[in-house]
Image: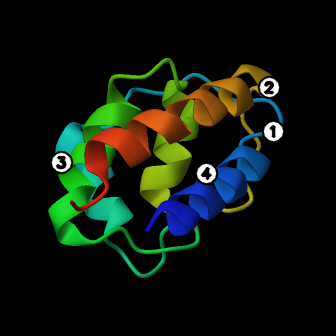
Amino acid sequence: MKKSICTMMAVGALLLAGCGETVERPTLREVSASLQDEKSALGSIVPPESADCFAKVLYESELSDGSLNAIVEGDTAYRGKKSDEKVLGSLTEALVGECAPK
């Protein structure tokens, strides 16, 4: 599971590497549902038992609204802010520590 989380975060960082636009932040429920979708922009489905935790960590982070929306919409062409790369990198430990099944 840890390897899968790291892989998803690396893919996410690559997706979010450009410029974003101003949009509203998606809901926690939308983020969780998108993480469980087979078309997830992160490249891997998050198991239902971990999805709500992952969504909460992402939602409460400093990740931009545009980047979070790209994750929800499965938009693999989206290029977010450079600061989002740093945020995603910093979230890996929280996602593994808090959300990985025990």
Identity of the residue drawn at 72% across and 35% down: 80
Callout 3 crowding tier (Cα within 10 Å): few <14, some 14–19, many ≥20:
some
Separation of residues labelled 2 and 4 (CA atoms) = 14 Å
Pointer 2 or 4: first along the chain: 4
Position of 101 relative to 24 (above/below): below
SS of the residue at dot 4?
Answer: helix
Asked whether disc 4 touches disc 3, contact meaning CB atoms under 8 Å apart, the reply is: no
SS of the residue at dot 3?
Answer: helix
- Three-letter amino acid code at disc 4? Met
Instruction: Return the residue at label 2.
Output: 82
Separation of residues labelled 3 and 2 (CA atoms) = 26 Å
Instruction: Return the residue at label 4.
Output: 9
Instruction: Return the residue at label 3.
Output: 29
Q: Which quadrant would the C terminus be assigned to in this image?
A: bottom left
Judged by depth in the image, the label closer to the viewer, 4 or 1, is 4
- Three-letter amino acid code at disc 1? Ala
Say whether residue 45 is left or right of residue 8: left
Instruction: Return the residue at label 1.
Output: 17
User: Residue 63 at x, y = what percent?
Assistant: 53, 26
User: Residue 6 at x, y = what percent?
Assistant: 60, 56
SS of the residue at dot 2?
Answer: helix
Pointer 2 or 1: first along the chain: 1
SS of the residue at dot 1?
Answer: loop
Q: Which quadrant would the N terminus be assigned to in this image?
A: bottom left
Callout 2 crowding tier (Cα within 10 Å): few <14, some 14–19, many ≥20:
some
